[in-house]
Image (spheres, helix red, strand yellow):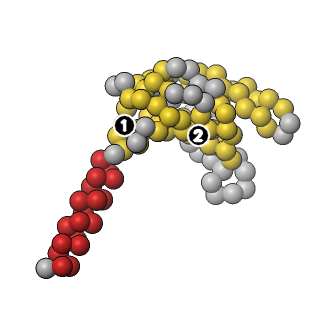
Amino acid sequence: MKRNSMLIAFVLSWSACASAQESATSVALLGAGDLHRLSEGKSPGGVRYAGIQLPGTVSVGDVFPIQYQKDGGTVSDSFMVTSITVTNGKCTLESKNGRVAGAMPERISASCRKLR
């Protein structure tokens, strides 16, 4: 009986965690974000750039300019939103660079509020 109760508790807690993550088509961003470039760096986690200024709202398909510091200089680039995932008030914006064949996805993490 005790084993069944533990199994049921585990399944319920797992399903609650899984349901906390949802996709979105439009979000309001609350402050700066962190850019994760998986294609850069030698570590498996890629490179992280903090303090990326973001627009107030973004939707899937939007393209917006980004700037970050790298090797003592400022890099200007653009970020095209291909998907948005919301988990407990944090958004992950994903972009796949279509100009580079086989490129790893880039991600921006930021606090947000789901709009759609």
Q: Earlier in the sequence, mark 1 or mark 2?
A: 1
Would you identify the image quadrant in which residue 95 lies? top right
Please name the residue that numbered disc 1 is placed on. Answer: 23
| Closer to the eye: label 1 or 2 | 1
Q: Where residue 80 appears, x then y in whole percent?
A: 55, 27
Q: Residues within 10 Å of mark 1 (few under 14, many from 20)?
A: some
* Residue 45 as seen in the image, left or right of residue 73: left
Q: Residues within 10 Å of mark 2 (few under 14, many from 20)?
A: many
Please name the residue that numbered disc 2 is placed on. Answer: 106
Q: Where residue 47 appears, x then y in whole percent?
A: 68, 47
Question: Mark 1 belongs to which amino acid?
Answer: Ser
* Badge number at residue 39: none
Who's the residue at 30% across and 47% down the image?
Answer: 19
| Residue 53 vertical position relative to residue 100 in the rendered view, above or below | above
Who's the residue at 58% across and 40% down the image?
Answer: 106
Given residues 82 and 87, the one toward you in this image is 87
Given residues 104 and 92, the one toward you in this image is 92
Q: Where residue 50 appears, x then y in whole percent?
A: 67, 38
CA–CA distance between discs 1 and 2? 17 Å
| Residue 79 vertical position relative to residue 2 in the rendered view, above or below | above
Would you identify the image quadrant in which residue 66 lies? top right
Q: Quadrant of the C terminus?
A: top left
Q: How many marks?
A: 2
Question: Mark 2 belongs to which amino acid?
Answer: Glu
